[in-house]
Image (cartoon, rainbow, N blue to C red):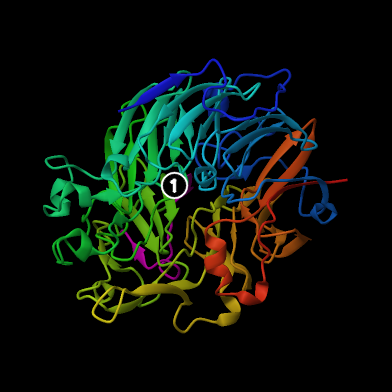
Amino acid sequence: MTRILLLCSSLLIGPLLTGQVQRYVPVTQQMLENPSPDDWLMFSRTYDAQRFSPLKQITKQNVGQLRMTWTRGMGAGQTETIPIIHNGVMYVVNPGAVVQALDATNGNVLWEYKRNVPANVAAQGRTKSLAIYQDIVAYTAPDSFVVGLDARTGEPRWQTKVDSRGNTSGPLIVEGKVISGGACAGNRANCYISAHDALTGKEVWRFYTTPATGEPGDESWAGAAVDKRLASTWGLPGAYDPVRKMLYWGVANPMPDQRSARHDGNPDAVSRTAPADLYSNSTIALDPNTGKLAWYYQHLPGDDWDSDYTHERTLVRTRLNPDPKFVKWINPDIPRGQDVDLAVTIGEAGGLFVLDRSTGKFLWAEPFPFDAPESVISGIDVKTGRTSINWDNVFKTPGEKHTICYWNTRSYWPTAYSPSTNSLYTSYIDNCRELTTAGPAGRGGWKVVPRPGSDPKALTGLAKINLSTGEILRFDLGRAPGNGAMLATAGDLVFHGDMSRRFRAFDAETGKQLWESILGGNVSVSTISYAVNGKQYIAVMTGDNLKVPELAAEVPELKTPSGHNAIYVFSLP
């Protein structure tokens, strides 16, 4: 049941630092569709999730002069979030279920909202972003409420319970609706994407990410009990096409993780080729007004290894000309040489997929970061786009051990696209997962391992992927895993930071490193660019997140410090 509270007082909030944003300008739908170059109004700046800033005061020629303008510490805990900027104000989530409005020129606090929840709940906060519309800042709180805050003062205006979903994702506001997903928290009743009226919090619709009995897609579960049909949207939010009026969202792996656990001990109960266990590991296209499904494409059928294909879908228009020298799977019927509107994604388990976003038609795909026999998929029917699971690595009996590639080659740190180079930029980790299921010998377990046969000196890197031809340029190779967001700018630059505490700028065309700053801790998601009073800034956050301990065990030589949660902002002198 949905519960809405319209808040006129301090109900269910903690201490509030009172202040006010002066000369606030409401954010309209038109502004969200065509934002000021100075603003960063959503997690990847624009609805197409390109993470491209049109600002170009900072260029390849002068980026070496970047200096720190201000820094501000944050509270202890996890930070996996991205700030937003509107009219010189930075709105940001702090660890501990705190939202702040800061002066984006110096980091001074304008207001602060603290959610009144138990410390253990606050510490679990993993929201990936905020969203803004009119005078409302939307916040997905760790106690499974979607909250509307007054953008001027931080006072709560409404809050709506979303069952016990677990708000590990973040909001996207489309046509006056707060669209959000989250974790399933072990219960199919929580496995949905929801829309709430941005001004009142009233629920408008919800879309369950797995079908119930008798619903479309039900047959893909082969009669599995409904309570064993789980697939979340725990990661980054989706994208929106305002011309087609269509949302594009990624759904994560089916749960329980193994086919046998979902299907009464029979891993072959569902198909080895798509579709299987819908809508897990799929791109789904939804009508933002109704939540109705328009189409889906499944990247991995009936996953067996917790291989998420959630996170953002990047929307691009480009001329199609995939080159067989660079691309393994190409639909022979693609309109070569024509400009096509695409939806592009890279999964946590690897693989770059390019779809026609009008219909979901498969266009081309490439194993990524490398083609490996341990890959989660064994092939794609290029005419239909149907993917096949790597059956050799599926667990057939208890106690088996397999190495599966890839494991979080990228995760909740978003990619970026530059129209200047027609290229998608991503970090990657050449990681696989050695997994043993429970059996007669014990409980089972897993660990992260390098890809068999890989170069230990090139465990990590950045990639520039031409979305017309599929050609890949790799740069910044080494042994420092990155969980920072990619950022591309009109200054022909790409910014990225990693667990070595290094935050760097690269030539977007060649990948040459042009600038570096050493920060106090792990660079976590976050990276954006904005401008105030004609001055361009680059902002990045350091801090702890759930992936750092896992990755630190693989590269102990980095000795990445923990507990250094802070915002750093740079500009030219």
Looking at the rendered image, the quarter that the N terminus falls into is top left
User: Is 291 on the left or on the right of 171, as rendered?
Assistant: left
Please count the marks in the image. Answer: 1
Residue at x 48% of width, y 72% of height? 431
Residue at point 50% right, 40% down?
48
The answer to which image quadrant residue 509 occupies is bottom right
Q: Does any portion of residue 435 appear in the rendered image?
A: yes
Q: Which residues are magenta?
A: 312-331
Q: Nearer the viewer, residue 59 or 297?
A: 297
Is residue 39 in view from this perspective? no
Q: Magenta includes 330?
A: yes
For the C terminus, which image quadrant? top right
Inspect the magenta stretch and tell me whether residue 518 lies in it.
no
What secondary structure is the magenta-colored segment mainly? loop
| Dot 1 alpha-carbon crowd within 10 angstroms: few under 14, some 14 to 19, many 20 or more | many
Q: Residue furthest top?
A: 8
Q: Amino acid at mark 1?
A: Arg
Residue 137 image position (x, y, % from top left): 56, 27
Question: Which residue is outermost to the right?
Answer: 573
Q: Position of residue 412 (x, y in %)?
A: 50, 53
Q: Nearer the viewer, residue 24 or 183?
A: 183
Q: Is residue 98 left or right of residue 275?
A: right
Q: Secondary structure at mark 1?
A: loop
Q: Nearer the viewer, residue 204 or 293?
A: 204
The x, y position of residue 415, in whole percent, is 54, 53
* Residue topped by disc 1: 313
> 57 left or right of 482?
right
Q: Residue at x 36, y 33 (%)?
A: 194
- Residue that sits furthest to the front in the current view: 118
Find residue 197 and report its image quarter: top left
